[in-house]
Image (tube, rainbow, N blue to C red):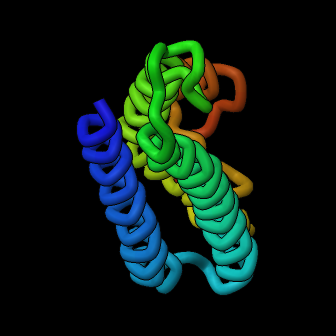
Amino acid sequence: MKRTLLRKFTRYHKKALFFLNDISEATRATTTVEKKCPIRSRDTYRMCVRHVSKQCRVITKSLVTSLEKQRHDVDAFTEAAICNVSAMKADPVQLIKTIAMEDAALEFALPGFLRLLGACSVYCDRFEPTAHWKKPKRHMSDQDLVIKHFLTRKNYEQLVKGTL
């Protein structure tokens, strides 16, 4: 029982370290996206990325430290002679449930982190409207052209030049 729990804790610990490594790599990879951002939006994008990666690191590290405390309980299983399960320091079934829940949460942590990083790209998509973009060019349909011709008594060339 002890060896099984220790293997599960070790496997979870390795997954958590790989996840922290993936967070670092993904954060470094955002520099290429940052370079494509408009200059005014780069700082807000950079702050968003830092905030997301910092929060994910803090959450993951706190989960790992809490599970490390429970790992010490697993080490304490066989320190003394235990005659029944109720005399154990921690319930092994509860520890197995906790490891399984945290392991499942860690499986979805990377997609969640990448989704949050993707949400930061909203700051790069914004652009300042210029005078050219404020007024759309109005294209006249044939029907509008005929109606204007009859109302203003202008020829075709004058009507087309007036709309541009």
Quarter-wise, where is residue 73 in the image? top right
Q: Position of residue 6 (x, y in %)?
A: 33, 46
Residue 99, given in percent of the width and then of the height, sits at 44, 32
Q: Does residue 5 appear to the left or right of 37 in the view shown? A: left
Figure quadrant of the N terminus: top left
Residue 140 visible? The answer is yes
Vertical comparison of 156 with 48: above or below: above
Q: Is residue 129 above or below residue 106?
A: below
Choose between 83 and 61: the one closer to the eye.
Answer: 83
Horizontally, is 110 left or right of 150 in the view?
left
Q: For the point 73% across and 56% down, which residue is it?
A: 134
> Foreground residue, 95 or 23?
95
Q: Position of residue 159 (x, y in %)?
A: 57, 43
71 or 25, which is in the foreground? 71
Quadrant housing residue 30: bottom left
Residue 2 placement (x, y as % from top left): 32, 37
Q: How many marks?
A: 0
